[in-house]
Amino acid sequence: MDVTAAAVAFGLILLAELGDKTQLAILAMATQRGPLSVFVGASLALVLSTAVAVLLGTVAKGYLPESSLRLVRYAAGALFIAFGAWTILRG
């Protein structure tokens, strides 16, 4: 296992998820329902969505040339920035 990749993925997800709308919705849900049930459900959802992303990335790597993978990373970064700017501008 690549410990550096695991640490970067952990940091990326942790920072990206702190204070986002999903986390605030989970916070609100935990005030009305059992915290353990909310924690388990939210954790499983994050694990499943991450598994889908890893699976799609693995499949894409097998079919796309390296130059296309670089383009995918740039496009994902640009979309991330665009969504962040859109969120700031509409708030």
Image: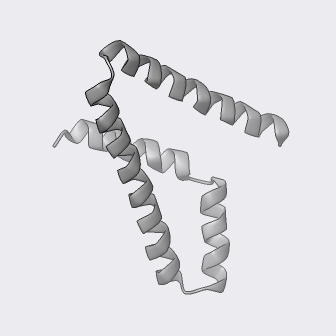
Q: Residue at x 45, y 59 (%)?
A: 46
Q: Residue furthest right?
A: 90
Residue furthest to the front: 63
Residue placed farthest to the left in the image?
A: 1
Position of residue 79 in the picture relative to residue 47 (left or right): right
State the residue at coordinates (34%, 31%).
Answer: 60
Give 57 or 40, whichever is nearer the viewer.
Answer: 57
Query: How many numbered tags mark residues here?
Result: 0
The residue drawn where x is 55% and y is 87% is 34
Residue 3 rendering spot, x and y as whole percentages: 21, 41
Say if 10 sits above or below 5 in the image.
below
The percent coordinates of residue 55 (x first, y second) are 33, 45
Q: Nearer the viewer, residue 82 or 64?
A: 64
Q: Quadrant of residue 67?
A: top left
Q: Classify residue 67 as left or right of residue 41.
A: left
Could you say which quadrant of the image residue 31 lies in?
bottom right
Quadrant where the N terminus sits is: top left
Instruction: Give x and y (percent) for residue 90.
Output: 83, 39
Left or right of residue 33: residue 47 = left
The quadrant in which the C terminus is found is top right
Please identify the residue farthest to the top as the structure is shown: 67
Q: Is residue 52 left or right of residue 31?
A: left
Above/below status of 43 relative to 2: below
